[in-house]
Amino acid sequence: MNDCLFCKIAAGEIPATIVDRTETTVAFRDVAPVSPTHVLVVPTTHVANLDEALAVDPAIAADVITQCARVAEMEGLADGYRVVINTGSLAGQTVHHLHAHVLGGRAHHWPPG
Ligand code: 5GP
Ligand code: ZN
């Protein structure tokens, strides 16, 4: 959608290190990784966040989650991984196109802080 960073990455208009593509999702490496593996999975359809995705079509969210598990497998994260979807300002969402963080390659403690 016109001025959306992740729409532009999904369309190939802004460069990113693409990990995988499906018909409905794109996975690419986070520009500022917080873990040895830090991949973002986004739907190719523009939705601002998880709530909007579920309102438009729950399959959008299902496809993103399914692809997170595939990316974890592709990245060799058999010992465990974390999927994070920040939703809204209090959660720290900064890019308003739904994205799931796939984090792995180190211990991730709980609670996350
Ligand atoms: P949020 O805080 O919204 O959940 O996460 C946004 C994520 O997008 C951050 O981890 C940030 O590092 C990442 N990010 C922001 N701009 C870019 C970019 O231009 N390219 C890539 N690959 N990642 C980005
Ligand atoms: Zn977008």
Image: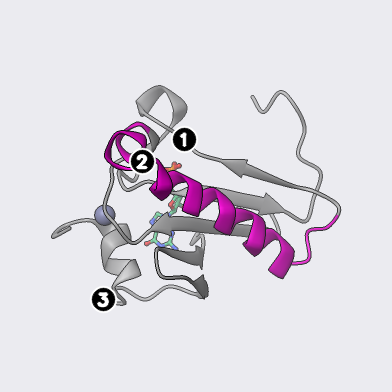
Q: Which mark is residue 94?
A: 2
103 or 60, which lies in front? 60
Q: Are marks 2 and 3 in contact (CB under 8 Å)?
A: no
Q: Are marks 1 and 3 in contact (CB under 8 Å)?
A: no
Q: Which mark is residue 13?
A: 3
Task: Name above or below for residue 90 compared with residue 107.
Answer: above
Q: Residues within 10 Å of mark 2 (few under 14, many from 20)?
A: few
Looking at marks 1 and 3 on the same chain, the residue that comes earlier in the sequence is marked by 3
Q: Secondary structure at mark 1?
A: loop
Task: Name above or below for residue 89 compared with residue 31.
Answer: above
Residue 96's x, y, as percent?
30, 43
Q: Are marks 2 and 1 in contact (CB under 8 Å)?
A: yes
**Magenta stretch: residue 55 in it?**
yes
- Quadrant of residue 45 within the rendered picture: bottom left
Looking at marks 2 and 1 on the same chain, the residue that comes earlier in the sequence is marked by 1
CB at disc 1 and ligand 1 closer than 8 Å: yes
- Residue placed under numbered mark 1 in the picture: 86
Q: Secondary structure at mark 2?
A: loop
Residue 110's x, y, as percent?
75, 27
- Quadrant of residue 36 within the rendered picture: bottom right
Q: Which mark is residue 58?
A: none
- Left or right: residue 92 versus residue 49 is right
Residue type pointed to by label 2? Thr
CB at disc 2 and ligand 1 closer than 8 Å: yes
Residue 105's x, y, as percent?
77, 56
Q: Image point 61% across, 52% down: which residue? A: 102
- Cα distance between the residues tagged 2 and 3: 20 Å
Q: Residues within 10 Å of mark 3 (few under 14, many from 20)?
A: few
Q: Where are the magenta residues, as a range?
A: 51-78
Q: Image point 66% across, 50% down: which residue? A: 103
- Report the mark closest to the observer, 2 or 1: 1
- Report the mark closest to the observer, 2 or 3: 3
